Amino acid sequence: MPADFARSLADFVAMGGHGLYVWLSYAAALGVVLYNVLSVRLRERRYLREHLDRERRHAGAGVRDAVHPARGVPEP
Amino acid sequence: MTLKELWHRLGSPRWFYQISGRLRLVLGLTALVLLVTGTVWGIAFAPPDYQQGNSFRIIYVHVPSALVAQSAYLLMGAAGVVLLVWRMKLADMVLAATVPFGMSMTALALFTGAAWGKPTWGAWWVWDARTTSMLVLLFLYMALYALRQAIPRPETAGRACAVLAVVGVINIPIIKYSVDWWLTLHQPATFRLTAAPAMPPEMWLPLLVNALGVYCFFGANLVGRLRLEILERERGTAWVRERLAGGQL
């Protein structure tokens, strides 16, 4: 801890009476960083899942299109 | 590779996808190191301001977010020109990929400005030239987001967004010079190209570190979003299927 906050953790959190404003700002910054990181991550995961589903359907298409398991007729 | 060759290659999203994976990783890791360093330094080790006390520590979030929000808009303006003149696909993707980042950073700059204004000016919000022009920037980002959603044909949407992005660039010098042109409560720029900062180094160095960090973060995030735009627009093509055959992006 630096000189001006050396006395206690409470002083550090209080920020000389400006704690609310300072910590609100840093919390908002963390929120914005997480939003930007996670929105890309989640889109990537969804894209990959959809891609793999599509590939699986492609691979199974030859078998399934011949006779539909439920209806017993070829799919259009 | 000459510049002209690079320019032509940028027309190929596939080429961009292939080279950008490592770039994104390097930018992301650099951003992480810089932002953690600058933030810890700024919040715990920089000395308090002799007038504002500790509330001035908001500067380490406020200034970097405001800077990158405006730079992101300038990039969109440039991408808009490239799209309108050369019809480059990648430019349209840049235009689409920058909006969420820029919008969130503008919102962060406005929010931290309010949180700093309350203890310093006595009000969360003032209709000052700087704050108002920054609010206009947020509305421009929102308009760009809404415009793309509203037009179903991607090519038409891209061109409409390009026009709006280019016209909106006029707001950037207004934001920058608002503190010089009008009498504002907002203080003038912290960093100037022509003069040394008025603060001591132990106060502005963490700010510089965080500013560089947020630009690296912007780079990493933009590349990440661009790669997704490419994958989504090239869905089902042979090279995408081949590339993703290993089950990884």
Image: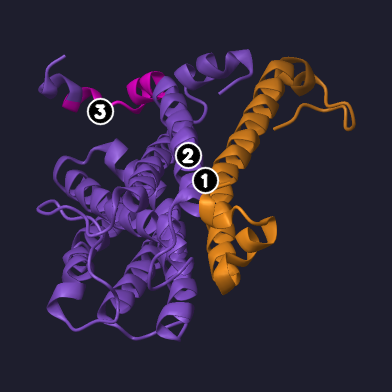
Chain colours: A orange, B purple
Q: Which residue is mark 2?
A: B37
Q: Chain of mark 1?
A: B
The residue where tag 1 is placed is B40
Judged from the image, the secondary structure of the residue bearing numbered disc 3 is loop
Secondary structure beneath dot 1 equals helix
Label 1, label 3: how far apart the Cα atoms are: 38 Å
Hey, what amino acid is under mark 3? Leu
Look at mark 3 in the image and give the residue it sits on: B10
Q: Earlier in the sequence, mark 1 or mark 3?
A: 3
Image-based side of B210 in relation to A27, left or right: left
Label 3 to label 2: alpha-carbon separation? 34 Å
Query: Helix, strand or loop at disc 2?
Result: helix
Name the residue at 52% across, 46% down: B40
Q: Is residue B30 above or below residue B171?
A: above
Circle 1/circle 3 CB separation < 8 Å: no
* Residue A35 on image: x %, y %: 57, 51
How would you rate the neighbour count of disc 2 (Cα within 10 Å): few for under 14, some for 14-19, many for 20 or more? some
Q: Nearer the viewer, mark 1 or mark 3?
A: 1
Residue flagged by tag 1: what amino acid is it? Val
From which residue to which does the magenta span run?
A: B7-20
Both labels 1 and 3 in a single chain? yes
- Residue B31 at x, y = what percent? 44, 36
* Quadrant (top left, top right, bottom left, bottom right) of the C terminus of chain A: top right
Pointer 3 chain: B
Numbered circle sitting on residue B166: none
Query: Considering only order in the chain, which callout, 2 or 3, is on the residue closer to the N terminus?
Result: 3
B103 left or right of B188? right
Crowd band around label 3 with a 10 angstrom C-alpha radius: few (<14), some (14–19), many (20+): some
**The stretch drawn in magenta includes residue B4:** no
Foreground mark, 3 or 2, reads 2
